[in-house]
Image (cartoon, helix red, strand yellow):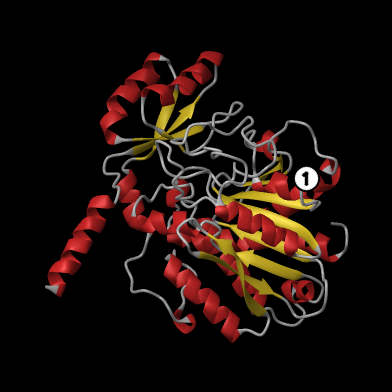
Amino acid sequence: MKLFVVLLALCALSAAKRFFHGDQVLRLHPTEDHHFQAIATLEESFPIDYWTDLYGNKPVDIHVPKKYLPRVKVFLRRNRLNFEIFIEDLQKAIDEQVTDRALQLNLATFDYNVYHTMDEINGWIDDMASTYSTATKVDIGSTYEGKTIHGLKISTGGFNRPAFFIDCGIHAREWVAPASCMYAVKYLVEATSGSDEYNLLQNIDFYVVPVANPDGYLYTWSGDRMWRKTRSNNNKVCVGVDPNRNWDINWSGPGASSSSCNDAYYGPSAMSEVEVQGQGNYLRSIPNLKGYIDVHAYSQYWMYPYAYSYSTCPDDTFLRSVATESASAIKAVHGTTYQSGPISEVIYQASGSTTDYVYQEIGVKCAFAAELRDTGRYGFTLPERFIQPTAEETFAGLKVIASYVANGQC
């Protein structure tokens, strides 16, 4: 009887899981005005998933379900819009992204070069806090489904020291962001005397949240690998809100969607998501918060406010200099090129974003946002072999911001 119940549960889980066999990711190359108009109408005609937004003269990556591929390609050719296939079979790319292995719930055997489940990450947080004297577990808030958002404070002690908050995984499908942030914690707790990270820890406190959207992240493992939003039910057509469009900073403005089925849905009201409320309250509770970064993937950008406006922020000259220095530090590690500048200039206009809120409403001068590897060949399915190099160069960029927090310029 018990076996029968287990089999029923497994069948139910399998039935609920979304698969992507035969789906493709296409990179479009718009060069003329009518190309942009054509791309803008694609979503109205086909259920496609934009992996990058329509902005400037940049390529646009779209995920197209197998069923609609012939019609979408005919549409693109009729509009003389050049495209190439970046991912031939999305399900194959997903299957190849993760190593087939046993669960890792022991710090002694923990492998940073694989993608980890939510249970593994929470276990890792507990183990880090119990193993290293500089690491303390902190609770940032809760989720719609009742989970606790956990993080780690890395500190050598002291009172009211400048703080640098590193927020990762707010968009659930961007797996390399949590993986890189876990590596950052590893580098900090294992810092040896005389190293850059050791010296930084003598002056500032770090807060690292590996997964700021646990409900969504868990769902990328159990239900839909391409899920981005929260999992809240707002009695709309579709579930979930984009937690990076839900902040009370030009909420519902340009770069956010009123459609609950859109990945950039801004939600029923500003700060409607319990995850956003909790993080906002926690950030305000840090007495000397001087640095912040919201870590995403992909596209290889290192950015700062504003996202909601094309206007330059009051600290543009200084923040541009820090971002440029961060990009240079990143390139020095593995030769990876990152573009730096204001969010609206580098990537797209986006209202209700975390970084803008932290900068303008909380008053953190050194507020940044990052898009890690790659530039689209793998996109959200970046293979595990790229975790370590991505983490190494990301940490180099993070250390640049931390150095400005430490020297008081933030």
Residue 78 percent across, percent down from the top left: 37, 14
Q: Is residue 114 visible?
A: no
43 relative to 133 in the view: left or right: left
> Which residue is denoted by mark 1 in the rendering?
360
**Splitting the image into 4 quarters, where does residue 292 fall?**
bottom right
Report the front residue among 193 and 244.
244
Q: Is residue 103 above or below residue 261?
A: below
Q: Seen in the image, is 261 located left or right of residue 208?
A: left
Residue drawn at (59%, 29%), measured in percent from left and top?
A: 55
Q: Residue, x 85% and y 40% (percent of image)?
A: 314
Looking at the picture, tell me which residue is in the foreground, 253 or 47: 253
Q: Is 131 positioned to the left or the right of 51 in the image? A: right
Instruction: In the rendered view, tell whether residue 238 sits above or below residue 361.
Output: above
- Camera-nearest residue between 347 and 222: 222
Q: Quadrant of the N terminus?
A: bottom left
Q: Position of residue 297 (x, y in %)?
A: 54, 49
- For label 1, the crowd category at 10 Å Cα-Cα, with few meaning under 14, some 14 to 19 and many 20 or more, is some
Q: Is residue 257 visible?
A: yes
- Is 87 situated above or below 142? above
Q: Quadrant of residue 167?
A: bottom right
Tell me the element at label 1: helix
Say what amino acid the circle numbered 1 marks.
Gln
Q: Is residue 28 above or below residue 265?
A: above
Viewer-proximal residue, 44 or 376? 44
> Horizontal and vertical percent for residue 26?
41, 34
Residue 161 percent coordinates (x, y) = 82, 71
The residue at 34%/44% (across/down) is 90
The quarter in which the C terminus is drawn is bottom right
- Farthest residue to the right: give it: 408
